[in-house]
Image (spheres, rainbow, N blue to C red):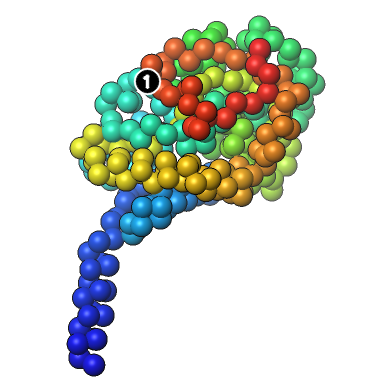
Amino acid sequence: MYKLILIWLLLISHTSIATETIRVRGSQSEHDSTHNYYVGLIELAFDKINKPIRIQFAPYMVQERALLELQSKRLIDLYWAGTDQQRESELGVVPIPLIKGLLGYRVFTIHQDKEPLFSQIKSLESLKSITLCQGQHWPDTDIMLAAGLSVITNVVYENMFKQVYVDRCKAFPRGINEAFSEVASRKQIMPKLKVFDDVILHYHFPMYFFTHKDNMQLIDDLKSGLMLAIKDGSFDKYMQTHPTTKHLFPLSKWKKKTILTIDNPFLSQSTPIEDKELWITLGNNK
């Protein structure tokens, strides 16, 4: 009997020691409906390699601050963000697109009164006359400016929805995986906010997990776990069932949309855009 109790205590002690704590940022606001998608992917990856983890949430911080915290090994261990060459050179990266590239398909969060304006957009040239909101430290901003689009920036995520609502800008381009749940979560406070998706702006833009360059074990664990999930189909199943991404399926629903493609000159040449296991392509690009 005493031997069994000792074995049980040793097992409990071993499990406690083996559990890894991963610190991530908190959500951007109470309406940040996509935050738990990425937290769930972390859990899925570690479940695939049978490694216990505990996720600890740090206070929310803007993107530039979060990346600095990663570099300094301070408040967070892991951050998910759109990539560019500079980020990949300064940080450790898990080079697996977390939404299979769908972050680069941008629909437009607008005030419903602006729908007639957006219904007239048929080309990239016509989109250039419309002022868009984007985050001040987001790679998207540089991508859109490089394509000649009109962009005003704000450092606060929630403020960009407010700017759309009071006509400070005409639209807030959001990832096709983000916009619908974001609008739904603000239905009470912004009832005339809506998603316009007849026209979609597209550029190659993967969302990656980033960490400090020295965190090689964390990088290897996430890469191994996510690749196992991709190989066995559980990654796709996760996307097809998660509340923030399930509306994207079946993918055939996007075939008749007008998709305007622009270049991303800040994308690393090592980006695996030809790997069909890692990327989803929508519609007929123009």
Question: Is residue 224 visible in this depiction of the protein?
Answer: yes
Residue 111 makes an appearance in the image: no
Of residues 30 and 89, the one nearer the viewer is 89
Q: Is residue 47 above or below residue 282?
A: below
Residue at point 24%, 40% (across, down): 216
Residue at 73 percent of width and 14 percent of height: 121
**Left or right, residue 173 beside residue 195:** left
Q: Position of residue 257 (x, y in %)?
A: 73, 23
Residue 251 image position (x, y, % from top left): 68, 34
Percent position (x, y) of residue 200?
66, 22
Quadrant housing the C terminus: top right
Furthest residue toward front: 232
For disc 1, the marked residue is 270
In the displayed structure image, the side of residue 112 where residue 59 appears, left or right? left
Q: Which residue is drawn at the image coordinates 25% and 74% (left, top)?
A: 11
Determine the image quadrant of residue 252. Answer: top right
Residue beneath the point at 22% across and 72% down:
13
What amino acid type is highlighted by mark number 1?
Ser
Quarter of image, res 170: top right
